[in-house]
Image: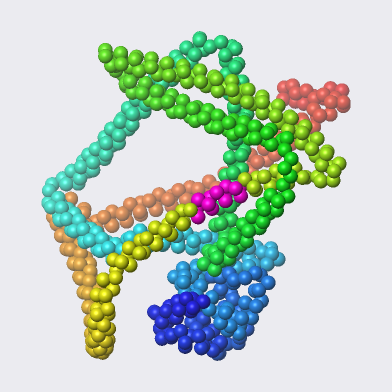
Amino acid sequence: MSEQIKFIVEQLNKEPFKKNLNLITFDSMEPMQLLQTLNDVLAEIDPKQAVDIREEMPEQTARRMFALLATLKYRPPGTSAEASSFRQGLVTGSKPVVHPVLHWLLTRITELKKRAYLAQFLMKLEVPAEFMQDDVVADTFHQYEELVEGFKTYHKECEQLRSSGFSTAEIRRDIGVMEEEKDQLIKRVERLKKRVESVSNHGRMLELVSQLRIEKEREESLAHQKQEQKNQLFQAEQRLQRCQLQLKELRQAAADAKPESLMKRLEEEIKFNTYMVSDKLPKELEGRRRVVQYLQRVVLEPAMGQDELEELEDKIRDVNVQINQLIERRMMRNDPMDDKLSLFRQQASIISRKKEAKAEELQEARDELAAVERELAQKSSRQLGPGGSEGMRGDEFKRFVGKLRSKSSVFKRKRQELAELRAEFGVLQRTEEILRQRQRAVLQQLQSVEAQKGVSGYSDTQEELERVSSIKSELDEMKGRTLDDMSEMVRKLNSVIMEKKTALAPLIKELRPLRQQCQELTQEYEVKKAQYDSCAAGLESSWSKLEQEVKALQEEMTQEESRYHHINCTREIVEMQIQRAADEMKFYVSPDPQERKKALREQYMKNIAEQESLGKKLRETQKAVRESHAPNMKQVKVWRDLEQLMECKRECFLRAQSQASVGQVFQEGGEDRLVL
């Protein structure tokens, strides 16, 4: 507790609190002062908490502090039954309650600032279900959720940018450099345009240059497409060669294979796959699921402090003590009678372990075989090459044949070992089945005997106790090794300490006069430090005045620069307008008709004439449409009446056909004839 109070006082004396406290003044604080200190720390984390608690009701203060601590995910020490005492202690300003809260806040103040800032935007509002039935409220809440998700995305991007090392000053500098380059390029383009305008037929030349650039880009894209198609063709040829090689190997395997060997191989593969699917893979999957669930629980749990970790360690020690007591009781009550099923259990466990080991070896062998086959296919494709010609010649081919023969002998030996292992695996599997049947029969008999004697479940309990006993023996052995290591380490440390003491004895004698000298220098340092602090305070005050003057001059310079740039831009715009007016006057008074056509007045007059002629044509079209509107409407009405008449005749015809009992209707020569 003293270390905790010392840490709190050190943190409160630093920035930004500067409380100038010591252990005595902090410990003698009144409850109201202690609550105000806690409120100041909370205000540093969340500025909304910056209030004077003397001007606030105690209930309101407690409610505000509880809400912020819940937002910061503070977990009070103790059980849930002690939560009411924690609330009462926080309201009254009790030291045993406030001191742990202050220690927890000050140890992680930076993290809590970030959490409080994010809580303002990420803690969703609770809207009752009956209000969510309203469409407007539902849409608004949906928009609110979208904004929250957007804030999460932007905050992550902001954190990534902060951690990426980019500087805004460097970015602004780069932008300024790029803007200068842009201005230079614009000026160069304008100068080149002025030079080109003096050349005759420059418009046609510009068009030809543009077409040339487009054709060059098209040529580059076509070359890129040609290269891609060549690569695709080469890959397709390689795939074809690999497929041909695989087809050749499959034909050779099918020619050499027999139905009996194929059936035997398929049965072995089916047995192996059945074991993998029904026994091995479900166990591994269940183990992975348990690990994932455990990790998810760990992730969902809030961050633990040192007090919580110590509490968990105490619980673990209590549970270990209880386990040891149970093991001792079991050993005291152990019956020395021989267990008939222990032999079968051991054999079954050995067989199951061997089975799992062989299955893993077989799976590794299959993976290795698949990798070797892929490597063989790649090497075959590289050996054949793009043109399909053989690459090995002479001595190289002989060496390859020798390696292949040695690998073939190794393969035959390994295949024989694999066949032996498979045979042994079949024998072990059959033995396991027999032992399981015997075990089930013995277990049924044992359960019936236990039920008759009134001790049902005794065998299961005894098995569990045996397992716990084996675990205890392993733990005891581990503890014994640990104690031996610790005793050896203590002996070594004692010897090292004695050596260090003998080595440090002369140094300690030399250190005593140096300590006296250090005290004298410390006093002199304190005097000099006081002089330095007074001088630094005067310099700091003058420095702050100069800094304010510099800031004022910088602001004035910035304003003048912006005014200068504005005037300069206005001048360039006016010059450009004057230049356009001079060009327009030059074109307008020019005796050359081609030059005069470039004038804006001539272009506008031409556009006006074209629009007037277009308007005249449209008025003539409108007049023609108005004159033909009435006859066209009459013709449309006639056609609609004709369509209704034909539709009526069709309906009558269909109705007559449906009445077959009355008669039949025939059409001859455009007339309908009814035959009864």
Q: Is residue 315 left or right of residue 573?
A: right
Q: Is residue 671 left or right of residue 46?
A: right
- Does residue 81 appear anywhere in the picture? yes
Secondary structure of the magenta portion, mostly? helix
Q: Is residue 474 magenta?
A: yes
Q: Is residue 620 magenta?
A: no
Residue at point 82% right, 42% down?
450
Q: Position of residue 64 (x, y in %)?
A: 58, 79
Quarter of the figure that contains the C terminus: top right
Q: Position of residue 641 (x, y in %)?
A: 68, 40
Q: Nearer the viewer, residue 499 or 113?
A: 499
Residue at point 22% right, 67% down?
573
Q: Is residue 175 left or right of residue 429?
A: left
Q: Nearer the viewer, residue 333 or 159?
A: 333
Q: Nearer the viewer, residue 256 or 420?
A: 420
Residue at point 40% right, 23% down?
377
Q: Is residue 565 above or below residue 278?
A: below
Span of residues in magenta:
471-483
Residue at point 18% right, 58% down?
184
Q: Position of residue 656 (x, y in %)?
A: 80, 29
Q: Position of residue 276 (x, y in %)?
A: 60, 32
